[in-house]
């Protein structure tokens, strides 16, 4: 959430940043200026009325000591109290409306984020690795996985519906191997602490990271005793997590950390559940858009002055996974119109998929500034300071396991349909160096 005082003091800049995101400021901000003015006027008038009432109260006390009549002054006191209560109510209504406006505003893009409306205007920052060349026609992962008997989309659809998959044999082991390798890399080399959070969260947690209220249709809400009402963030209703970012970021909700604790770096391996609302008809084949997938997530809590450097560091940690696996990729700086709601700057890492002859996003690494911390009330106390401040949060996939899995199938496929296993994964694959057709699978 953006600070009210910042919006008030920098309204032209806020309008410019919203336009950069492809939004109409007059629609997004509504009558912000009028509401804010009326709220401040009401608060000022309330203070004036209270001061008048206090003077009258002192006068009444003096008159009573003198035995004088205080009827007129008492009437004025009641009138002032009634008027102040009315104005306080009006200020509360304005305050509520301002919160609604601020909660619906996306984060403001950093100055170096390119202007643009869609993915076509994202900027390529770097490429790494040579695209694999084959002496045969490369196949997409769904054909490879089904022919090897390690992926089964039809049986998954029978069990759960579309956009699910069942893994078998070496395929199931590959998924587990990737997760274990990523966790080991990030904890042993990159200094993250592993966390195993709940896979269900309440509405307040999803509000804190920015998924609610705007993106409710993208989530799976549990049919439990709680019921979701827009704007009401309960403790006892539950949603399946869309990413580990939500529970891990909310670990420190409503807490104040000491500066000495920062930076804090967590990694978590969890399933992720997404309704993929609005994506029907797109990527219907394979594992690109699943309702359930697994991901290793990286989350950082940092001092504001460190968030830029930590963003670059987190992105490099995600890139390291791709490089160790020998998967060609490119880093894209997202334009303002293609960034997520809560992000102020985002790098997308896109892996090359030869079976489809295209790049696919495999990690989004975002700096949220104080946006999530303000919504979730996560603060830190700078050394020697009397007042606490909002810290900065960052997160990125390190990596999406399913998309890494399919990238390995497509990049390491061989002419006979088998899949070579990247060297770093061999110890995690029980010594197997090749994925072959599963026996007894049809």
Image (tube, rainbow, N blue to C red):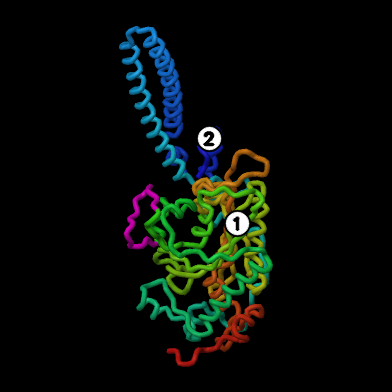
At a point 40% along the width and 63% down the height, the residue shown is 275
Q: Which span is picked out in magenta?
A: 220-234
Q: Residues within 10 Å of mark 1 (few under 14, many from 20)?
A: many
Q: Earlier in the sequence, mark 1 or mark 2?
A: 2
The reply, left or right, for residue 323 in relation to residue 281 is right
Q: Quadrant of residue 326?
A: bottom right
Question: Magenta stretch: dominant SS?
Answer: loop
Q: Nearer the viewer, residue 219 or 42?
A: 42
Indicate which disc residue 300 carries: 1
The location of residue 94, given as percent across then percent down, is 40, 33
The location of residue 168, given as percent across then percent down, is 48, 83
The residue positioned farthest toward the bottom in the image shown: 440
Callout 1 secondary element: strand
Query: Taking the image as drawn, is residue 119 in sight?
Result: yes
How many numbered marks, from 0 up?
A: 2
* Residue 304 magenta-highlighted: no
Callout 2 secondary element: helix
């Amino acid at each position: 959430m953006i600070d009210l005082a910042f919006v008030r003091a920098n309204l032209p800049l806020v309008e410019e940043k919203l336009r950069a995101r492809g939004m109409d400021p007059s629609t997004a901000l509504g009558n912000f200026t009028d509401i804010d003015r009326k709220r401040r006027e009401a608060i000022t008038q309330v203070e004036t009325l209270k001061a008048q009432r206090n003077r009258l109260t002192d006068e009444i006390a003096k008159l009573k000591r003198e035995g004088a009549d205080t009827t007129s002054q008492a009437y004025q006191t009641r009138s002032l109290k009634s008027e102040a209560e009315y104005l306080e109510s009006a200020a509360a209504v304005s305050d509520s409306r301002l919160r609604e406006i601020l909660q619906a505003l996306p984060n403001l893009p950093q100055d170096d984020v390119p202007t643009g409306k869609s993915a076509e205007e994202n900027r390529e920052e770097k490429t790494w690795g040579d695209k694999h060349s084959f002496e045969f026609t490369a196949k997409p992962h769904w054909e490879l996985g089904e022919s090897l008997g390690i992926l089964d989309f039809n049986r998954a659809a029978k069990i759960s519906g579309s956009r699910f998959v069942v893994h078998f044999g070496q395929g199931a082991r590959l998924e587990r191997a990737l997760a274990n390798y990523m966790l080991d890399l990030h904890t042993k080399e990159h200094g993250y602490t592993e966390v195993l959070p709940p896979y269900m969260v309440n509405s307040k947690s999803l509000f804190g990271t920015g998924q609610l209220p705007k993106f409710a249709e993208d989530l799976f809400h549990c049919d439990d005793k709680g019921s979701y009402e827009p704007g009401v963030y309960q403790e006892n209703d539950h949603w399946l997590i869309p990413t580990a970012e939500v529970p891990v970021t909310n670990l420190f909700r409503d807490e104040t950390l000491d500066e000495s604790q920062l930076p804090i770096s967590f990694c978590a391996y969890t399933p992720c559940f997404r309704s993929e609302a609005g994506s029907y008809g797109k990527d219907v084949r394979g594992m690109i858009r699943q309702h359930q997938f697994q991901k290793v997530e990286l989350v950082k809590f940092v001092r504001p002055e460190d968030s830029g450097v930590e963003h670059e560091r987190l992105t490099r940690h995600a890139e390291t996974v791709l490089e160790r696996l020998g998967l060609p990729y490119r880093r894209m700086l997202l334009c303002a119109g293609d960034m997520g709601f809560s992000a102020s700057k985002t790098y997308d890492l896109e892996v090359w998929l030869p079976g489809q002859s295209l790049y696919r996003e495999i990690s989004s690494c975002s700096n949220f500034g104080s946006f999530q911390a303000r919504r979730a009330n996560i603060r830190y106390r700078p050394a020697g300071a009397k007042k606490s401040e909002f810290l900065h949060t960052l997160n990125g996939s390190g990596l999406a396991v399913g998309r890494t899995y399919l990238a390995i199938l497509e990049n390491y496929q061989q002419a006979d349909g088998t899949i070579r296993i990247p060297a770093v994964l061999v110890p995690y694959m029980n010594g197997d160096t090749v994925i072959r057709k599963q026996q007894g699978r049809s």
